[in-house]
Image (spheres, rainbow, N blue to C red):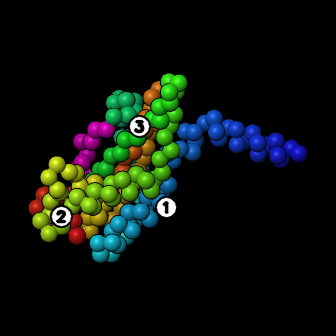
Amino acid sequence: MMKLSTIAMLCVLALTMPHVYAGAIDPAAIISAHNKLRAEVGVTTKLTYSPTLATTAQVWADHLKTSNHCQMRHSQSEAQYGENLYWGSALSWSDGRNELQKVSSEQVVNHWGSEKADYDYTNNQCARGKMCGHYTQMVWSTTTSVGCGMAVCKDTQEQVWVCRYLPAGNWVGKKPY
């Protein structure tokens, strides 16, 4: 009987604390989603997950949380690292409540990967008015590692994700693969 009560309490706790499980970084999912996109275009170098890059990405995500209210802004280290940013809004309810949106690591990577549709490899450019630099950084053939961080602004329940890449990609005039 005691075990059932403990399990029930953990379920209630999980339901009342969505920040515990919503938006958590899943390194395996990040690597899998990136490498799938890379394989689709013939990039054979598989990315590895870098705890060092993840630490620097987390520091920047935390900075965006505390100094920029979870609004996206690239760091000044873009020349050193490649960097992709993702912002997730809160779920807003008619009664005025805001709730953390459940965003998975795979969803974040696939969001950036959706830019593939707007990338013209032959001409090495994005469709007019579209963005594709997140995608090209992900499939940049000389990039070997990635690390990610995320932060939640508790007052708004918005979230900001940061992934950093080494070596950086997106060099002007060069194709990603």
Q: Is residue 56 visible?
A: no
The answer to which of 163 and 97 lies nearer the viewer is: 97
Q: Is residue 6 visible?
A: yes
Amino acid tagged 2: Asp
Looking at the image, which residue is at 45% across and 29% down? 156
- Picture quarter containing residue 39? bottom left
Amino acid tagged 1: Ala
Q: Is residue 23 left or right of residue 130?
A: right
How far apart are the two marked residues, 3 and 1, measured between alpha carbons? 24 Å
* Residue identifier under label 1: 28
The answer to which of marks 3 and 1 sits earlier in the sequence is 1
Name the residue furthest top: 96
Q: Where in the figure is residue 139, as x and y percent of width and height?
A: 29, 64
Name the residue furthest front: 94
Whether residues under marks 1 and 2 lie with C-beta atoms below 8 angstroms apart, the answer is no
Q: Is residue 78 left or right of residue 125?
A: right
Give the secondary structure at mark 2: strand
Q: Find residue 89 and name its label.
A: 3
Q: Nearer the viewer, mark 3 or mark 1?
A: 3
* Residue identifier under label 2: 120
How far apart are the two marked residues, 1 and 2, measured between alpha carbons? 29 Å
